[in-house]
Image (spheres, helix red, strand yellow):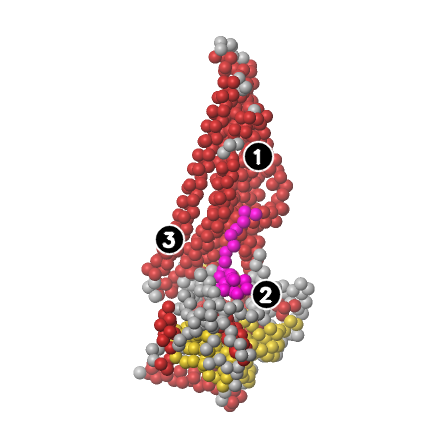
């Protein structure tokens, strides 16, 4: 696609911090020639944060560093042989300037600048092509997003960064999607609706009885006639009976609909939580715990209250208004029309306010989730907070989130506080219109005083319900906002989908085969073209620098994520063709930081097999070398474990984790830095437990200390997502390659630590 022509020179959007430097080193083309585009870099060659700038124009590529000397400015004229290569790995992007296989320069940046870098490379390639054809090309100036300063898409004019976090406003129609949860209770809902209809009709009887009470009893009595006690008794009995009937019907419909709404809310919570559990780890990686807890907790409660109270009130209001309007028109159409005078103004006001309320309430929900997220971060990490004496800082963080929540609520309350009194004012004006018009009709003899009295009683109910309906706009938008946040979870499709026609998984032997496996975290290539075969019962150790892809590879084997390229097979069957639960029940996982749930020791050991007997639990604990310390606890296996295992040492938590893995008797075992966070003595105890655990099982082990992998049948050395070496410890040491360098580096570090301790 040809790039559009734009004006040139240093535009207004050029970084002000670099403008003087750029103008000092080059006389940029005048308007109408090739104007510059640029990329602000933030890393140096040593991956330290250091600003620099790349500027591309028709005269070539310029690099300006933060240094003030002349050597910090370099220029490369455009050349058909010049190439600008773009790659990324582990959160760091790289630009390489190459000519005829010779690297001229290398620049690095964090992936927050990935989009501008991609656009710069595209501009470079287009400009180089045009230059080779002898046609100078004015560069397309990149328009920047006003929010995040990222380049806008030239075709869609949309920011690729902000497009991922834009919050679409909730629609009131979202509430209709709740019907899937209400459908099982449709007959109870029908009964509630009929009771609502009947109870509303019963409440409309008393005003109608006031007509004969006024015209046939009270007004004739003032004229000197005797009161007909029989008629009075009949009318008063009718008033009492209708009130009693309305009470009974109102109680029945409220009780039935409250039961239904509670069950709809419970089903909504359960369905949302079950769906959440089935989502992949990728979903949780981009969400905060407090936000998800708020959605399942407070949002479902808000919907529940709306269904049990406000929706019932809304239905009653609608029925009451329709019935009242029918009665009013049957009594006197002209006076009924006067009653409707405020309606257009109220409808216009509701239309104006509704959209602002809808977006405002969703923003309140998001801000409130920030408050709960601070709590979800701080309370589980209270030990770290106290260890670093950061109570004041965390209190300030909560205070800031709470103040933000207050500001957002205040803005919405200013709107709502004006809306509600305005509706009340409109209804009062309508009542004055009816009074004035009604008095004129009485004076003209068109209606009686009794009719006017009944009319005013009905109008009072009409306007009261109208005012109530206007107020329900607020709670409706709150419920719509909550429903949208719930359905955001329910509509999310797991990135690890279940197969449409799952293959049965026979008894697993434990043979793993990885064929040309590739995987990316967003824009980062983490695993590239990896091939590996693990035989049943074999122990393979994964080693490499931090960020080399070891843990990601383990996550792929567990199918926490699906591969982007290639395939992973277990006993010759592609993992993607097998039900996730069928495969994972054959996997045992021991992590660097074992997670224990609140409950007893026995319950934590039996987490993977809740039906396990006490004898099986004890046998697993013995094999994990945990039995002795468990018996020293006050209640032994029935001792309560605090949240996340508080009250137990790291080694004790790890041995319980190993016992948990032993109890399910997995065919495939994953050890992810299982001994890296404990002391030497504890490591020996854990290593004994691990020896029992790995026996006869296919084992993939990651360890920071290479000495702990001496018993591995094979070692696989990884670097930048690729397998660079493979073999036993002795074979790899003899090659003096990547593994040898890692081992030597650890030995030197260990000797330095011993010397420091000796001093």
Badge 1 vs badge 3, beta-carbon distance below 8 Å = no
Element class at badge 1: helix
**Picture residue at 67% right of the left edge, 63% below the top:** 500
Residue 587's spot in the image, x, y percent? 58, 70
Element class at badge 3: helix
**Picture residue at 34% right of the left edge, 78% below the top:** 68
Looking at the rendered structure, the number of numbered marks drawn on it comes to 3
Q: Nearer the viewer, mark 1 or mark 2?
A: 1
Residue 614 lies, with reference to residue 739, above or below; the image says: above
Residue 331 can be seen, yes or no: yes
The residue labelled by disc 3 is: 403
Residue 482 lies, with reference to residue 308, above or below; the image says: below
The residue labelled by disc 1 is: 319
Which comes before the other along the chain, label 2 or label 3?
Answer: 3
**Picture residue at 65% right of the left edge, 74% below the top:** 571
Residue 158's spot in the image, x, y percent? 51, 62
Which comes before the other along the chain, label 1 or label 3?
Answer: 1
Element class at badge 2: loop
Q: Is residue 134 magenta?
A: no
Residue 407's spot in the image, x, y percent? 39, 51
Q: Is residue 157 magenta?
A: yes
As drawn, the label of residue 496 is 2
Using a 10 Å C-alpha cutoff, classify the residue at mark 1 as few (fewer than 14 neighbours), some (14 to 19) or many (20 or more).
some
Which comes before the other along the chain, label 1 or label 2?
Answer: 1
680 or 56: which is nearer to us? 56
Badge 1 vs badge 2, beta-carbon distance below 8 Å = no
Residue stretch rendered in magenta on the structure: 152-173
Res. 580 image quadrant: bottom right
As drawn, the label of residue 297 is none
For the residues labelled 2 and 3, the Cα–Cα distance comes to 39 Å
């Amino acid at each position: 696609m040809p790039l559009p022509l734009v004006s040139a020179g240093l535009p207004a959007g050029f970084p002000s911090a670099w403008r003087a430097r750029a103008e000092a080193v080059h006389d940029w083309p005048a308007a109408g020639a090739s104007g510059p585009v640029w990329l602000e870099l933030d890393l140096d060659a040593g991956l330290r944060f250091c600003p620099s700038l790349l500027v591309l124009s028709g005269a070539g590529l310029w690099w300006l560093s933060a240094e003030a000397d002349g050597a910090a400015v370099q220029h490369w004229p455009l050349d058909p042989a010049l190439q600008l290569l773009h790659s990324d790995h582990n959160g760091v992007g790289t630009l390489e300037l190459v000519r005829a296989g010779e690297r001229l320069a290398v620049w690095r940046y964090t992936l927050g600048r990935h989009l501008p870098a991609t656009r710069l490379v595209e501009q470079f390639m287009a400009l180089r092509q045009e230059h080779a054809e002898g046609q100078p090309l004015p560069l397309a100036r990149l328009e920047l997003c006003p929010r995040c300063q990222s380049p806008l898409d030239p075709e869609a004019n949309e920011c690729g960064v902000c497009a991922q976090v834009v919050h679409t406003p909730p629609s009131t129609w979202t509430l209709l999607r709740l019907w899937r949860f209400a459908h099982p209770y449709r007959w109870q809902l029908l009964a509630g609706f009929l009771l609502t209809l009947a109870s509303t009709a019963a409440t409309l009887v008393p005003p109608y009885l006031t007509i004969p009470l006024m015209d046939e009893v009270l007004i004739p009595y003032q004229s000197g006639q005797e009161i007909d006690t029989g008629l009075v008794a009949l009318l008063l009995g009718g008033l009492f009976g209708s009130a009693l009937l309305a009470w009974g019907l109102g109680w029945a419909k409220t009780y039935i609909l409250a039961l239904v709404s509670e069950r709809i809310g419970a089903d909504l919570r359960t369905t949302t939580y079950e769906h959440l559990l089935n989502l992949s780890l990728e979903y949780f990686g981009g969400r905060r715990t407090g936000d998800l807890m708020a959605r399942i907790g407070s949002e479902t409660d808000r919907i529940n209250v709306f269904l049990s109270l406000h929706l019932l009130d809304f239905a009653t209001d609608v029925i009451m208004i329709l019935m009242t309007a029918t009665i009013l028109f049957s009594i006197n159409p002209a006076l009924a029309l006067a009653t409707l005078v405020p309606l257009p103004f109220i409808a216009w006001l509701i239309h104006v306010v509704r959209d602002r309320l809808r977006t405002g309430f969703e923003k309140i929900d998001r801000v409130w989730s920030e408050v709960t997220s601070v709590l979800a971060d701080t309370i589980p990490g209270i030990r770290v907070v106290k260890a670093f004496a950061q109570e004041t800082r965390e209190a300030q963080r909560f205070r800031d989130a709470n103040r933000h929540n207050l500001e957002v609520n205040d803005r919405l309350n200013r709107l709502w506080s004006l809306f509600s009194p305005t509706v009340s004012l409109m209804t009062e004006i309508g009542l004055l219109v009816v009074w004035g018009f009604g008095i004129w009709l009485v004076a003209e003899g068109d209606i009686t005083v009794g009719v006017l009295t009944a009319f005013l009683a009905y109008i009072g109910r009409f306007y009261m319900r109208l005012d109530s309906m206007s107020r329900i706009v607020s709670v409706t938008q709150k419920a719509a906002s909550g429903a949208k946040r719930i359905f955001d979870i329910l509509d999310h499709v797991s990135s690890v989908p279940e197969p449409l026609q799952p293959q049965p998984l026979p008894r697993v032997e434990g043979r793993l085969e990885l064929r040309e496996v590739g995987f990316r975290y967003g824009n980062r290539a983490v695993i590239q073209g990896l091939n590996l075969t693990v035989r049943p019962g074999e122990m393979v150790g994964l080693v490499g620098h931090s960020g080399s892809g070891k843990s990601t590879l383990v996550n792929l084997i567990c199918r926490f994520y699906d591969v982007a390229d290639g395939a992973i097979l277990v006993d010759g069957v592609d993992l993607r063709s097998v039900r996730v639960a069928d495969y994972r029940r054959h996997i045992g996982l021991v992590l660097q930081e074992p997670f224990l749930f609140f409950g007893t020791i026995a319950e934590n050991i039996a987490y993977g097999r809740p039906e396990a007997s006490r004898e099986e639990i004890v046998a697993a604990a013995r094999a994990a070398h945990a039995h002795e310390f468990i018996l020293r606890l006050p209640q032994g296996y029935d001792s309560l474990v605090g949240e996340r295992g508080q009250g137990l040492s790291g080694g004790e938590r790890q041995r319980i984790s190993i016992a948990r893995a032993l109890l399910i008797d997995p065919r495939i075992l994953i050890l992810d830095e299982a001994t890296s966070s404990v002391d030497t003595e504890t490591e020996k105890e854990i290593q004994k437990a691990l020896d029992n655990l790995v026996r006869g099982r296919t084992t993939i082990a990651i360890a920071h200390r290479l000495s702990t992998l001496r018993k591995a049948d094979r070692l696989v050395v990884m670097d930048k997502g690729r397998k660079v070496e493979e073999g036993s410890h002795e074979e790899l040491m003899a090659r003096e390659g990547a593994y040898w360098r890692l081992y030597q580096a650890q030995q030197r570090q260990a000797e330095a630590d011993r010397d420091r301790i000796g001093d």
